[in-house]
Amino acid sequence: MDMSIHNSLHEAALKILRPLVRVLLKHGVSHGIVAELCRQAFVEEGFEHMARAGRRPTVSGVSALTGLSRKEVKRLSETDGSSLQIAEKRRNRAIRVISGWVNDKQFQSDGEPAALPLEGSGASFAELVRIHSGDVTPAAMLSLLEDSGNVRVDDGKAVLKKKAFIPLDTSLDLLNILGTDTAELIDTISHNMMAAPEERLFQRKVSTSLIDREALPEFRELSSRRSQALLEEYDAWLAEHEITDQENQESAYVAIGIYYVEHFEQEI
């Protein structure tokens, strides 16, 4: 590998790792745990890398590719990581319920999310959850959305307060967002590094280091308001184009994320 590319990769890795390590240190996660996770990531990606290259993934092949011993590769390949998917499922189901509330006309009143009775076979919160969240109980979903500040209950009716699902007290969900959304952004950048120009995915940002600090609150409000409106527009379009027959139609995963960064010179 060209040394300039090698050095650039080292610098990029450090830039990615430092904010992650900051979070890990705050939560008491030691270097040893992270090193184990890195080994596991190398093994999992090693198997995927060989499969994508059209080669049969083997323990010996992944060992040669990653530099880990065959014993380590075998041990790590047998690790069950299914528990890491639980928080993501909770988040996705909450988002689907809110999206259904916003976009499904049977749960609207004058084009806006209606105040829904908690129970009932018609336009109720229980029916909303049944249609849009799968096997989560209405009580569990209501508790989750109340904890996140999205829903309040007034006179026996569920009222949607916020359209964006951002967990407040559910720290496990917040940590899951850290993993999922960061990984998706890196996946997009990685894809664009390898893809032909016409096959690259949209990935842009605007920034300046010369903004007047007194203008920050105004820009923060402007960016939040317009970004939320844009995401709601995308969400409505996606809701109209979801498959209705899972047995006979093929589906795919798609996401668009918007983030906001703000820091001062001494924090860089």
Image (cartoon, rainbow, N blue to C red):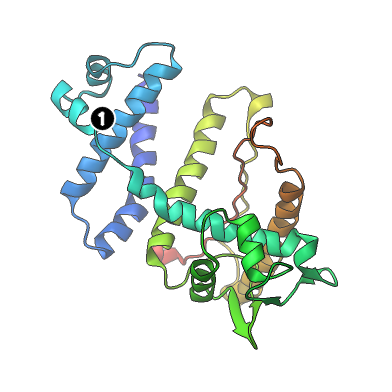
Is 40 on the left-hand or right-hand side of 1?
Answer: left
Vertical relation: 149 (above or below) 7: below
Is 204 on the left-hand or right-hand side of 18?
Answer: right
**Residue at the outermost bottom position:** 155
Q: List x then y, in percent, for residue 111.
A: 83, 68
Give 74 or 180, whichever is nearer the viewer.
Answer: 74
Q: Residue at x 21, y 42 (%)?
A: 35
Mark yes or no: residue 142 visible: yes
Give 117 or 89, whichever is nearer the viewer.
Answer: 117
Q: List x then y, in percent, for residue 158.
A: 64, 77
Vertical relation: 217 (above or below) 259: below
Give 145 or 181, whichever is nearer the viewer.
Answer: 145
Q: List x then y, in percent, for residue 66.
A: 26, 24
Q: Badge 1: how crowded within 10 Å, few (<14), some, or many (20+)?
A: some
Per the image, the residue denoted by label 1 is 77
Q: Residue at x 23, y 47 (%)?
A: 34
**Residue at the outermost right position:** 110
Q: Secondary structure at mark 1?
A: helix
Q: List x then y, in percent, for residue 58.
A: 28, 16
Q: Amino acid at mark 1?
A: Ser
Q: Residue at x 35, y 43 (%)?
A: 82
